[in-house]
Amino acid sequence: MTLLKIDTVTAGYGVGPDILKGISLEMEKGKSYCIIGPNGAGKSTLLRVICGLLHPRTGKVMFKGENISKLRTDEILQRGICFVPQDFSLFPDMTVKENLRMGGYIMSDRKEVERRIGEVFEMFPILEQKSRDLAKTLSGGQQQMLAIGRSLILQPEVIMLDEPSLGLAPIVVQQIFKSIDRLKDAGMTIIMVEQNAKKGLEFAEWGCVLDLGVNRFEGPSETILYDPRIQELYLGKIQREHIDD
Amino acid sequence: MTDMALIIQLLFIGVSLGGVYALMGSGLTIVFGVMRIVNIAHAALMMVASYVTYFAYIRIGMDPILSIFLTIPLMYFVGVITYKVFFSRLSKGIRYGELTVLLTFSIALIVEGLLGYFFTNTYRSTSPTYSTSAFLFGELFLPKGQFYATILSIVLIAALWAFLRYTRIGNAIRATMQNPTAAQVVGVNIEKASVVAFGIGLALGGAAGSLSTYMFPFYPGKHWEWIGILLSLIVLGGMGSLLGALVGAMLLAVTATFVSHYFGPTWSAVTFFLALFLILLFRPEGLFGKKMEVK
């Protein structure tokens, strides 16, 4: 069943040129997607459009048959789409617990928020240990866990992650991907933009290659990962990594 | 008076001025913190509250301290309207920072012009009994008016702090100050948080406008002196930091009092601008501010 449909969307910032140039994509419930592509391809812009931080200039974004292109971010959150931006986007001068509480900002049942914070603590025990520490004092990996944990407070249907491995040590990246794996197993739809294309494609079931604001190619992740044309065009880095391996 | 007694006396006066400066500065800093608006019109709108207080005092004998119950809601309302009319539409545009400076500058000029037109450029002040009496401690004295104003200012700043910390909209404002993108991502309606923050900023300015009427005689153009002082103290404290506004205000008020005593009152104004100059040179993010990102 199609959950999210991006229909010939163009979008850009301010009076600048279009970054997305008529992109179309369909995403199904419970599947995981990895969007790859060179810098400036529009990967992050696409996520920003889906979650309402940026409105499309033309085209539309449909979620469960409803046009959400004109909605504000808080209205899109209410419908069950959460976004974890690049560089974690935490509230640096709030404690870990306060950050998690902010994750439930749109919920009126405060008791339920506290209960779900408990669930996040079960998933990431380190956050419970550090619950009274200010977010800015956490390590990069802990900050990423907190950002993911915060988005889980709403128990969203779709979670979008912008470069979850950016700037993290390999061992921490392993941990982060392990926790995202659990979300996948729990049936959540996951859309991930990942610079570390190999890692992202190994994780996701479906891959999309974006270039210059359009969807150049999509298919099952392994097809993309091992398609020689794609490797040559977009995954030069991956080939090298394979050799390194 | 012994040297020690003199130092304590000057501290008394400095701190009791600092509270009011802090109240004025906290409104300015919260508006900057949430919306990145350097509100040059903050002190001009504060003057509006001063005139309201003055006429309430002259016409119906209303106590200037009590009139904060009039000016706080009034200026909150003025803030909400001002934000919705002028700033809402700018917020998504380009060159937002530059435009808001020009816009608030022109609002300051318009307010000053209107006040001058209606109330002339004569100096005004209120003179409740406590404005001319003092608490005496041996050879030391503490002016009652300044003392009351500072206590009230600190109470108001504490109330603001509690509001930001314990209410839902307060948390939304705090979140927006710390990271606007993250705030949006968790569902904060930035527009609503901005409207409330702008209203609160001016409401604090309104209270300060009322309290200042019996300490500092005013006329429409007085706001230029104030905005210079206020900008220097919030830059010192770190723009957008409430604690910074309080500490910056206390530090500068005390320093200015000492400078005024030892070098003459003419030099006390220089304290603020010298501090502004030095802080921009050596620690532009201020004492409690975050380093600005250049985008």
Image: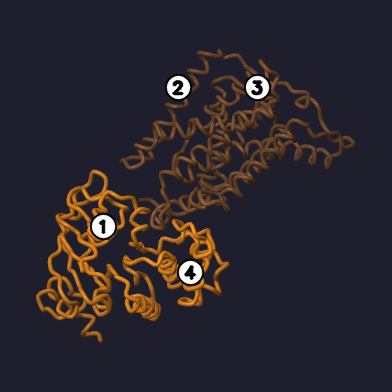
Callout 2 crowding tier (Cα within 10 Å): few <14, some 14–19, many ≥20: some
Q: Which mark is residue B217?
A: 3
Q: Earlier in the sequence, mark 4 or mark 1?
A: 1
The three-letter code of the residue at mark 2 reads Ile
Question: Which of the two residues, B45 or B200, is positioned nearer the viewer here?
Answer: B200
Query: In the shown orientation, is residue B85 left or right of residue B281?
Result: left
Q: Which residue is mark 2?
A: B110
Mark 4 belongs to chain: A
Q: Quadrant of residue B139?
A: top right
The answer to whether residue A158 of the structure is visible from this angle is: yes
Q: Position of residue A214 (x, y in %)?
A: 15, 60
Dot in front, 4 or 2: 4
Density class for disc 4 (Cα within 10 Å; few <14, some 14-19, many ≥20) is many
Describe the element under mark 3 as helix, strand or loop. loop
Residue A191 drawn above or below residue A178: above
Q: Which residue is mark 4?
A: A116
Q: Are marks 4 and 2 in contact (CB under 8 Å)?
A: no
Q: Colour of chain B?
A: brown
Distance of label 3 from label 1 (alpha carbons): 54 Å
Number of on-image labels:
4
Q: Which residue is mark 1?
A: A45
Q: How far is the residue under mark 4 from the one under mark 2?
A: 52 Å
Discs 3, 1: same chain: no
Where is residue A193? Give x, y as percent: 27, 67
Residue B6 - label: none
At label 1, the amino acid type is: Thr
Pair 3/2: label in front:
2
